[in-house]
Image (tube, helix red, strand yellow):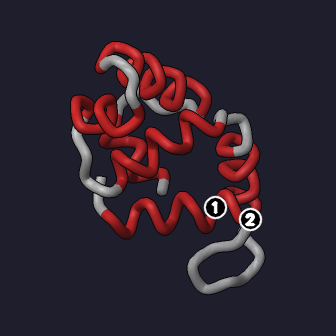
Amino acid sequence: MQEDVTGKIIAELAGRNQNNTIPSMRAKEEHKKLKQLTNREIEVLRLLGSGFNNREVARKLYISEGTVKNHISSILKKLEIRDRHKQLCLL
């Protein structure tokens, strides 16, 4: 993921879009999904959005690479997306 994606995620978590306006119905639904994420999942997502790969995320958070993959799977399930490419489209 790219740096601007992280900004969109953070904006969604804050309940506003990047123009600082109230989000549309679709964005509100997406916001509900994002609120399901744990703090750790958000950390993983932010690091991935900053360009870190799974191994780098694991080292940064002092967890195993397998745990990072588990977090990613959980994120994708909660956001109802099948893969990382669709995750980028959502945001």
In the figure, is residue 53 to the left or right of 48? Answer: left
**What number of labels is visible?**
2
CA gap between label 1 and label 2 equals: 5 Å
Residue 15, disc: 2
Q: Which residue is mark 1?
A: 12
| Residue at 53 percent of width and 22 percent of height | 74
Amino acid residing under circle 1: Glu
| Residue at 54 percent of width and 35 percent of height | 41
Which type of secondary structure does the marked residue at label 1 adopt? helix
In the figure, is residue 7 to the left or right of 11? Answer: left
The local crowd at label 2, few if under 14, some if 14 to 19, many if 20 or more residues have their Cα within 10 Å, is some
Decide which of 57, 72 is in the foreground and name it.
Answer: 57
| Residue at 34 percent of width and 46 percent of height | 48
Q: Quadrant of residue 28?
A: bottom right
Decide which of 24, 70 is in the foreground and name it.
Answer: 70
Residue furthest to the front in view is 62
| Residue at 48 percent of width and 32 percent of height | 81
Residue 29 location in percent, x, y? 73, 49
Considering only vertical position in the picture, is 70 above or below 8? Answer: above
Decide which of 28, 11 is in the foreground and name it.
Answer: 11
Q: Do callouts 1 and 2 mark residues in contact (Cβ within 8 Å)?
A: yes
Amino acid residing under circle 2: Gly
Which type of secondary structure does the marked residue at label 2 adopt? loop
